[in-house]
Amino acid sequence: MKEQHDMREKVLAAHREAIRITHDAAVPATTVWRFMPGLKRRSHVTRVLNSLVQHGMLSRSGYSDRRGRFVVTYGMPRAGGQKS
């Protein structure tokens, strides 16, 4: 349980850093992953980001990119605690 909490904190810190550097309201998991040196699997970051969404610490949204693929992005939750 402690390892899971530590990983959440690391991913949340990397997410905050990605938001700060990119100046975007929400960023995809691949961007967060780039701010976590040494972590090889992006799927771990995605899993933790989805867990943070379930706990109300992040919100999830998305858009269609130039190639027509849907990109899921993660941002800070809106005031009022609405879940996506």
Image: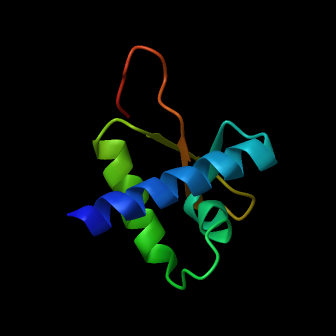
Task: Say which quadrant the C terminus sits in.
Answer: top left
Instruction: Left or right? Give the position of 20 relative to 36.
Output: right
| Residue 12, image x, y percentages | 50, 51
* Residue appearing at x 60%, y 68% in the figure: 33
The furthest residue to the front: 2
- Residue 58 vs residue 6, the one in the foreground: 6
- Residue 38 vs residue 2, the one in the foreground: 2
| Residue 46, image x, y percentages | 44, 64
Task: Say which quadrant the N terminus sits in.
Answer: bottom left
| Residue 5, image x, y percentages | 32, 57
The furthest residue to the left: 1
* Residue appearing at x 60%, y 82% in the figure: 38
Instruction: Left or right? Give the position of 21 relative to 42.
Output: right
| Residue 78, image x, y percentages | 49, 23
Asked if 21 appears above or below 46 in the picture, the reply is above
Q: How many marks?
A: 0
* Residue appearing at x 47%, y 67% in the figure: 45
Instruction: Left or right? Give the position of 54 relative to 14.
Output: left
Asked if 81 appears above or below 83 in the picture, the reply is above
When asked about the image quadrant of residue 24, the answer is top right
Asked if 41 appears above or below 20 in the picture, the reply is below
Asked if 67 appears above or below 21 in the picture, the reply is below
Instruction: Left or right? Give the position of 63 relative to 18.
Output: left
